[in-house]
């Protein structure tokens, strides 16, 4: 009897210990890849709605540049770009939600800066989109450069780094301007449309979206100048290097694919390529996928399901989209831009 | 000298169009779809925004004044320095007629004449034996010769072919654009032609 009771007690203790361990493990397991596999989906924090970057239609289908990046990660892991759960986040909560593991990746037009990495214990694996402050001006003005914008009225949103950058840049170049400030972007756009100012300034990607909403979009141009650095990047938590590597190399695989001419349309042909660079990318040579904890064809999956960097750019924000933002800085390093990925080897 | 020059002009024009003609016949249900002599260029044709002339950011170590043609993109860049380029939309060589390299502009011509090759006449007897430069000429308003090749940058009477891969290796711009480019470049200008990498 006594033995039975103590046996029961021991059994109970073991069960409690196992349960506690399981709970602790689940809670403190920092291996995002394992959690993702168990869940059978990547949790992706996105913007609640930003033209070209993250948008959801009436049926809840998400699309956009940031959205496609998460789909690419899902394609690499699951060979299925639909295994993503999108979590719309506003700007204030985004870092907290990532820290508390509500999402695996933040792909939410977020500017990489030092303090964001150090203060929030986060990590920005690589730049996905080089944005920066630009200028929209009426075409009739025939301005070729920001340096032609002296003595103009410039509309700018108050309380933004945009306003500070504007002041710095014009001062540094000995240009005078009349600043017209607005609390809301909406009001700024309206004022520009009504002709209260000659110029509107904001980040370039935003200007292209704003221009579409003008009464006569074709009468305004966005100058090619970029006067500030707004490198948009996906974000992950620190101290999960395996996951960070997957996110980083997903992006680099897409950029390398474009450089090598591998697209979603010719991926089957690329699988038969005898070119060493292409073979390493698509996994017919080497074990680069396995080294990431994925499969040999991880990058081929990304390209097949989502496309290379240029395809994703064109579809969402570039030539094939409504926005039609020229590649600019986001063109490959050997074609006029600065998009450069370390070699996959 | 002028006579010889004109002859060279005629010969390369013929070569360019001949290539386009023979191959066009094999691939297209309608021959020479990219070249319709006599068709007056529709100057009111609206190019897709992507192919309209615009100043863009372009970083390169090539000196200002260089032309860089990125065929896969269907864009021709005239480098301006200070990280800028003027970008024009172009029509490029179709599959099998793609080439890359560095050449110089060796000659410029306004409203170049056209002498269709005998093969083309045989197939389309209604074609003129000689076509003076003008708005109905497939070579368009201007031509800039590349090295000693048959390739050139020229205008077109088919603005709707900008953005396509239809030529035999020549690069075509709408007439307004080719005239604009013509004024900005001199004989001797370096032209870099880039293709998408092969798998």
Image (spheres, rainbow, N blue to C red):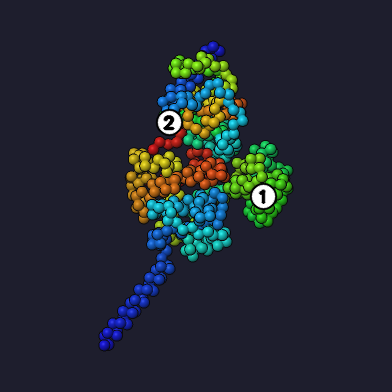
Residue at mark 1:
A189
Q: Residues within 10 Å of mark 2 (few under 14, many from 20)?
A: few
- Residue A152, horizontal then vertical, whole percent: 72, 44
| Location of mark 2 (residue) | B95
Q: Residue at x 43, y 24 (%)?
A: B25
Element under label 1?
Answer: helix
Does any portion of residue A168 appear in the rendered image? no
Among the 4 quarters of the image, the one containing residue B110: top right
Decide which of A167, A84 is in the foreground and name it: A84
Callout 1: residue from which chain? Answer: A
Q: Is residue A206 left or right of residue A258?
A: right
Q: Is residue A337 above or below residue A115?
A: above
Q: In the picture shown, does residue A331 fall above or below A61?
A: above
Q: Quadrant of the N terminus of chain A?
A: bottom left
Query: Percent position (x, y) of residue A109?
Result: 54, 53
Side of A92 relative to B119 (left or right): right
Q: For residue B155, what is the image quadrant?
A: top right
What element does badge 2 sit on?
loop
């Amino acid at each position: 009897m006594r033995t039975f009771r103590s046996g029961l007690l021991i059994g109970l203790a073991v069960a409690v210990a196992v349960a506690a361990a399981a709970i602790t493990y689940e809670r403190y397991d920092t291996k995002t890849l394992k959690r993702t596999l168990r869940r059978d989906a990547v949790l992706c924090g996105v913007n609640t709605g930003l033209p070209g970057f993250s948008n959801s239609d009436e049926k809840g289908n998400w699309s956009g540049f940031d959205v496609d990046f998460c789909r690419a990660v899902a394609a690499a892991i699951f060979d299925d770009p639909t295994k993503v759960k999108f979590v719309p986040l506003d700007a204030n909560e985004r870092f907290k939600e990532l820290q508390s593991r509500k999402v695996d990746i933040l792909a939410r037009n977020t500017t990489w800066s030092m303090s964001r990495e150090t203060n929030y214990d986060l990590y920005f694996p690589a730049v996905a989109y080089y944005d920066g402050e630009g200028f929209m001006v009426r075409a009739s003005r025939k301005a070729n450069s920001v340096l032609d914008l002296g003595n103009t009225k410039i509309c700018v949103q108050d309380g933004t780094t945009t306003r500070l950058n504007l002041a710095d840049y014009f001062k540094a170049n000995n240009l005078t301007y009349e600043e017209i400030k607005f609390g809301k972007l909406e009001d700024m756009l309206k004022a520009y449309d009504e002709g209260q100012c000659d110029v509107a300034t904001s980040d370039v990607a935003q200007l292209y979206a704003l221009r579409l909403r003008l009464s006569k979009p074709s009468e305004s141009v966005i100058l090619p100048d970029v006067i500030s650095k707004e490198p948009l990047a996906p974000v992950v938590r620190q101290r999960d290097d395996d996951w960070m590597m997957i996110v980083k190399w997903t992006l680099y695989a897409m950029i390398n694919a474009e450089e090598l001419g591998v697209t979603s349309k010719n991926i089957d042909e690329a699988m038969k390529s005898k070119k060493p660079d292409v073979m390493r990318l698509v996994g017919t040579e080497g074990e680069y996928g396995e080294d990431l904890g994925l499969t040999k064809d991880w990058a081929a999956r990304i390209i097949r399901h989502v496309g290379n960097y240029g395809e994703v750019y064109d579809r969402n924000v570039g030539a094939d989209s409504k926005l039609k933002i020229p590649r600019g800085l986001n063109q490959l390093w050997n074609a006029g831009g600065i998009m450069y990925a370390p070699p996959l080897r | 000298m002028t006579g010889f020059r004109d002859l060279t002009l005629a010969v390369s024009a013929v070569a360019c169009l001949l290539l386009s003609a023979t191959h066009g016949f094999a691939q297209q249900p309608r021959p020479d779809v990219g070249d319709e002599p006599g068709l007056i260029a529709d100057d009111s044709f609206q190019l897709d925004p992507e192919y309209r002339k615009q100043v863009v950011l372009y970083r390169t170590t090539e000196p200002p004044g260089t032309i860089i043609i990125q065929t896969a993109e269907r864009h021709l860049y005239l480098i301006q320095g200070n990280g800028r380029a003027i970008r024009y939309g172009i029509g490029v060589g179709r599959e099998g007629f793609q080439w890359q390299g560095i050449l110089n502009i060796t000659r410029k011509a306004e409203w170049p004449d056209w002498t269709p090759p005998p093969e083309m006449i045989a197939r389309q007897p209604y074609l003129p034996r000689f076509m003076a430069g003008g708005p109905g000429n497939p070579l368009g308003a201007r031509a800039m010769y590349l090295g000693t090749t048959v390739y050139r940058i020229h205008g077109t009477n088919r603005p709707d072919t900008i953005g396509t891969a239809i030529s035999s290796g020549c690069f075509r711009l709408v007439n307004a654009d080719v005239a604009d480019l013509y004024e900005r470049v001199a004989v001797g200008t370096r032209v870099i032609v880039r293709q998408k990498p092969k798998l």
